[in-house]
Amino acid sequence: MNNKMTVGQKAAFGIGAVGKDLVYALSSSYVMYFYQDILGLSATFVGLILMIARVFDALNDPFMGILVAKTRTRWGRFRPWLFSGTILNAVVLYAMFAAPDLSQSGLMVFFSITYILWGVTYTMMDIPYWSMIPAVTTTIPDRENLSVIGRTCAGVGSALIAMGTMLMVGILGGDSERTGFRYVALIVAIIFIVTEVICVFFVREKSESKMQTTSVGEMFRALFRNDQAIVVVITIVLINSALYLTSNFIIYFFKYDFGGIGWKGSYTMFSTVGGAFQILGMMILYPLLRKKLSNQKIFTVSFCMAIAGYALILAITMAGLGHNLVLLCIPGALVFMCNGMLSVLTTVFLSSSVDYGELKTGRREESVIFSMQTFVVKLASGVAVFLTGVGLDLIGLVGNTDEEGVIAVQSASTIMGLRLMMTILPIIGLIVALIVFRRKFRLTDEYVEEIGRKLRGGEK
């Protein structure tokens, strides 16, 4: 039987990634802003609930992996969960951004319940999506290619949210950001359902994947047996923490520091440029650099360029040039482009760590390694959004609801704190990630090729 995937099947898998990351990016980037700045909840409270929910959700991933592993239906193991999780998550997403008029205490309860439900239902479809890779194709090149396609298309979905959300909020809601977010959430939920239905219909299991998930303890032991997978996981946590800190702080920068009547348009332009360069980095620049440089060198260069981009943003704002959108877009494009390449490379490194683990232990743990990818991304976003909430309260940022109409004026110390947090914190995270990677990661291109030869030849 020919298990090689067709172009249409790969495209359907990528479309599924676009849809699911539209949803994830809307939640991770705008829930804090929606409930703190528009609805008036404490930033620390919102950040705490977000972190608790993300950590709980991340810890819930292994249990979801076990449920998927034990599933047997006429439609396969993964697709029933992918479909049902998508429908439920789309409904909860809309409810979360269509919060009714409640008292502060009532709104706190409503937010806590809906956000936790959102995380649980997202896990229902996200774990099966990534874990089904070994079941839809048995060829190693196809598996690695599918991983890159999924991660790249996920980046496209995230970039689309960054580029279009505030513009659509303004168009659909007028002066009411609350109304605008409700309509945007409805549109994203519908697109989400359509994209996942396409994925479910065209991407079908061709083989029985060997998901060794007899217990949660076994899943974690499988990860800890693979020291290179752990290094990649730690690196992903730090990279994504930096990215989520940026995405959560940047909207406050444009609203309260950059300012002006047209701040939403400026924010949208900055996000559009950043999103475009993120896609450029993943789909064009990385393949071009890969022809001349090793993955490890590209990774190091991307880190250094991203750090330089953040430093340049800080220098521009401190020099009093923070209202020049063109100047801000230059380092912004650099940061997003490098994040795009780092995202692709971490997925490639995870694939390599699977082969490394098989050579070291004799067990091939695709499902464990790739389920841990979703685990750590959620953990990173939870930590980042909690730091955002605490940081906003520490610097004394005064939010205002859309009903007030006039943007609240912030103190000079608040603006200074905002500039420092949106640049220094990500820089620290990236520097630590670079140190960990340089000291501990050993899967060079040559070593990966050697591992492949040994596995194909049965050597040890």
Image (cartoon, rainbow, N blue to C red):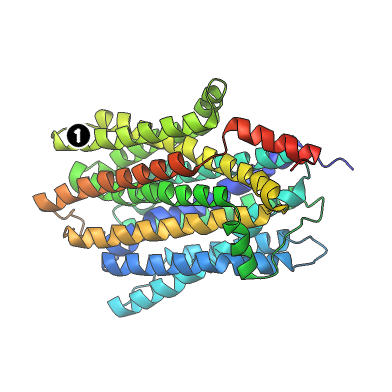
Q: Which residue is mark 1?
A: 315
Q: Position of residue 48 (x, y in %)?
A: 34, 68
Q: Residue at x 44, y 68 (%)?
A: 53
Q: Position of residue 34 (x, y in %)?
A: 34, 60
Q: Position of residue 167 (x, y in %)?
A: 37, 44
Element under label 1?
A: helix
Q: Residue reaching furthest top?
A: 292
The picture quadrant where one finds residue 396 is bottom left
Q: Is residue 289 above or below residue 139?
A: above
Left or right of residue 371, residue 177 in this image: left
Left or right of residue 4, residue 441 in this image: left
Q: Evaluate whether residue 307 shows in this view.
A: yes
Q: Residue reaching furthest left?
A: 412
Nearer to me, 303 or 438: 438
Question: In the image, what residue type sits under mark 1?
Answer: Ala
Q: Is residue 447 above or below residue 132?
A: above
Q: Evaluate whether residue 103 shows in this view.
A: no
